[in-house]
Amino acid sequence: MRRVAITGLGTINALGNDVETSWARMLRGENGVGPIRRFDTKDHSVHFAASVDLDLTKHYSPPDLRKYDLFTAWALLAAGEALRDAGIEPEKFEASERERWGAVLGTGIGGITGIEAQYLEMMEKGPRRVSPHFIPKIMANAVAGQVSIRFGLLGTSFTTSSACASAGHAMGMAWRAIQWGDADIVVTGGSESATTPLSLAGFGNMKALSGRNDDPASASRPFDKDRDGFVMGEGCGILVFEELERAKKRGARIYAEVKGYGSTDDAHHITAPEESGRGPARAFAEALRHAKLNPDQVDYVNAHGTSTPYNDLIETRAIKLAFGGHAKKLAISSTKSMVGHLLGASAALEAVVTALSIHHQKVHPTRNLTNPDPECDLDYIPGAARDLRIRNALSNSLGFGGHNVSLCFGRPD
């Protein structure tokens, strides 16, 4: 099997609109959560989120903005950043080479921003006022299709959708496409723009969200005894996966190697995780099996860590099941403590973070972990960032539907 390197990174999230800004703020444990300004929340139970602050009119023409939902517009910008970071200029390559370059991207909800806007347009002004761009704008696969079109990626191209595991599955499929010789480069990751009136109401009414309207900055508190739900986040994480020998030959900077991928399902409940943690534990173990690693060869875990009472407890159980006694020696942190839950894009941003952690040998803290839950008794890095020798790391995602994904990244041997 061919080996796969990460050679480029891009992101847009509540802490920054590029990798450099976001990573620096994460290491400082900064807050990306605040009041929602995009729409009126007075009738909602929750009034805050981890929102992206980006003026798209500085990046796109009015005709383009009519064609792109937010999740696609953000992904296109971050894909450009990731390709520049990788030192790849697609326009300089012949079509015959780009036939082996693909785009596999995840989204959990897709173009809900456009769906809500166009539904209101139709109800207020009639069906003839619905945009002719509506369908190609809001369809979930628009993100992969538009990235392929923009950058001339002529190989495999599709979108995965499995709730909070969406981008994890996308990266697993990208890894396999290169492993199996179907592609040499894949732009992968995920994007989500679900902070809308309808989705905020839906998640709020199912009691999934934190209700700390009086103190949004402390609302996302994974593994803390006082956690009361997740915080809506949005944005994207984009990575360039590249066949390792190709990357070495051209002298590319390699952030990390993609070593393994595990995917399972709880087969239990559409929203609630199965309480034993066996489903996620099997995904973690499967990722290690593909990587040909023993549990004690892993030093860091970027946890799913949503800040919901059940998820954090069950992920802790799963880590203990998969790692046994070594679980106590792992350094573990939750990126969601700062940027909220990016839903279908969460695994992508967290993969970006994990690759940076391996490359820089540093891990960011879990913000707001001030009153540890006695049942979440592992090292979740409260307080401050930490220098850490990382040989290998896991990045975990657990999604509605019982979907569990774990990706193993490490330093190339």
Image: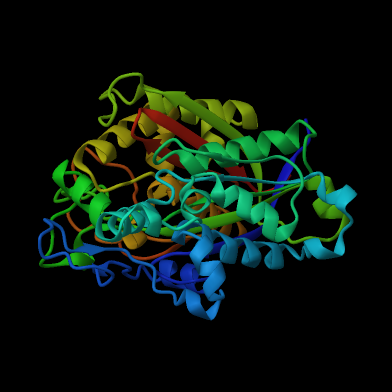
Q: Position of residue 235 (x, y in %)?
A: 44, 60
- Left or right of residue 371: residue 364: right
Q: Residue furthest bottom?
A: 58
Residue 213 falls in which quadrant of the image? bottom left
Q: How many marks?
A: 0
Can residue 98 be seen in the rendering of this structure?
Answer: yes
Quadrant location of the C terminus?
top right
Residue 209 in the image: above or below residue 53: above
Residue 385 in the image: above or below residue 107: below
Residue depicted at 31% across the width and 36% down the height: 316
Name the colouring of the figure.
Answer: rainbow
Residue 276 falls in which quadrant of the image? top left
Quadrant location of the N terminus?
top right
The residue lying toward the viewer, choosing from 331 and 289, is 289
- Left or right of residue 169: residue 268: left
Can residue 19 be seen in the rendering of this structure?
Answer: no
Residue depicted at 59% across the width and 44% down the height: 409
Residue depicted at 89% across the width and 48% down the height: 96
Residue 123 in the image: above or below residue 373: below
- Left or right of residue 178: residue 298: left
Residue depicted at 68% across the width and 52% down the height: 148
Q: Position of residue 109 (x, y in %)?
A: 40, 45
Q: Position of residue 146 (x, y in %)?
A: 62, 54
Q: Position of residue 181 (x, y in %)?
A: 80, 34
